[in-house]
Amino acid sequence: MPDTTGTHLMPRPPRPGEPVTVVGAGIAGAWAALLLAEAGHPVTIHEAGTAEMVGAASHWAGGMLAPDCESDGAEPAVVRLGHRSIDLWRSVLPNTPLNGSLVVCHPRDRADLERLARQTAGYERVGAERIAEMEPALAGRFREGLFFRGEGHVEPRVVLPALHARLRGLGAEIRFGSPVRPAELDGTIVDCRGLGARDAQPELRGVKGETVLIETAEIALSRPVRLMHPRWPIYVIPRTGNRFLIGATTIESEDASGVSVRSALELMTAAYTLHPAFGEARIIELGAALRPAFPDHAPRIVVTGRRIAVNGLYRHGFLIAPALGEIVANYVAHGTRDNEVMRWS
């Protein structure tokens, strides 16, 4: 397994083939377990929830793989990890859609597009003709935009079971409905419980994200489209079966009981301004979840003896989980250390 960029070796011998227990089967736990299993470690995963994972933040995620497009509000580590993760997604799931990310705006919101252009990199400016070539459904609707080539998206409720199946194929055991406390386990433990880990990391907080899943055959998109707007900027992500996930809300609240009326109205109104066909779409689902975040919004891997805690993925779980899993696997196998995200306690 290749070393992760910006690392050096810890002064301790490798432990090839050592059994590892992973706590949490969401996207962080699944990727850590997968890369550990591929490195030859016997892996057991404990997941408190059911196999459907409906209680996990991963179940409700957007699944955008957009390190450059989202770099305006992300920590530098997220961008680095995101680029590495795209390579890992491509390696493990070769059919991962990597058609890029498209950002558009209405003329009145051009200042917001220019702000994004100043704060990001890795894009090309596109005009109305190019937008129409990439997304025929948007022809004539937008004069300019930013195209982030090489980015992509995954469908969380498809790829997470695929990762679980791959784990089983490698001989890993996944125990659903099996809540455990990492501090009470023996051996090498990788704690990927998200907000469930506040018993060990009390500085974690939940940041609410809300989404609307709709269905319509009146429009087709081949990549995530982000619409700039000063009040309700949104992303629309294509799903299978003529479905689209609309999201963008980030609310400082730990109430995940449902989507507020205001958020639902704003999300759907913004989608309508992207294309009027969304006004006739059928609402399939309103969803809300809490994303685990540290105060600095940066991910952390905290090592306490033989316990390794991976947490704080915030809004970027599917974007950075593969690279974080690689860092964990390299540390367990070789003692490799990544100073940007790893800490010791």
Image (cartoon, rainbow, N blue to C red):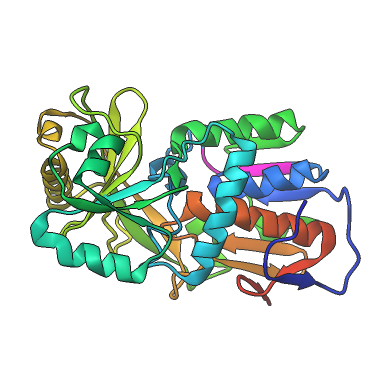
Q: Is residue 242 visible to the viewer in this orientation of the structure?
A: yes
Q: Is residue 22 left or right of residue 298?
A: right
Total marks in image: 0
Prevailing SS of the magenta stretch: strand
Image x and y of residue 324, in percent:
62, 58
Indicate the quadrant containing the C terminus: top left, top right, bottom left or bottom right.
bottom right
In the image, is residue 48 part of the stretch drawn in magenta? Answer: yes
Is 41 colored magenta in this rendering? no
- Name the residue rendered at 42%, 67% in the picture: 74
**Viewer-proximal residue among 133 and 345:** 133
Q: How far across and how far down the image is residue 250, in percent?
A: 29, 60
User: Where does residue 219 sit, x and y in percent of width and height?
Assistant: 21, 28
Nearer to the camera, 73 or 109: 109
Depicted 247 relative to depicted 83: above or below: above
Residue at the image point whose x is 29% and y is 63% from the top: 253
> Taking 191 as reference, is 297 above or below it?
below
Q: Is residue 249 above or below residue 275?
A: below
Is residue 185 visible in this depiction of the protein? no
Write down the region rendered in magenta: 44-49
- Res 281 quadrant in image: top left
Left or right of 206: which side holds 13? Answer: right
Classify residue 111 as left or right of residue 134: left
For image coordinates 68% across by 54% down, the residue present is 326
Q: Residue at x 72, y 28 (%)?
A: 169
Rendered location of residue 108, percent (x, y)? 8, 60
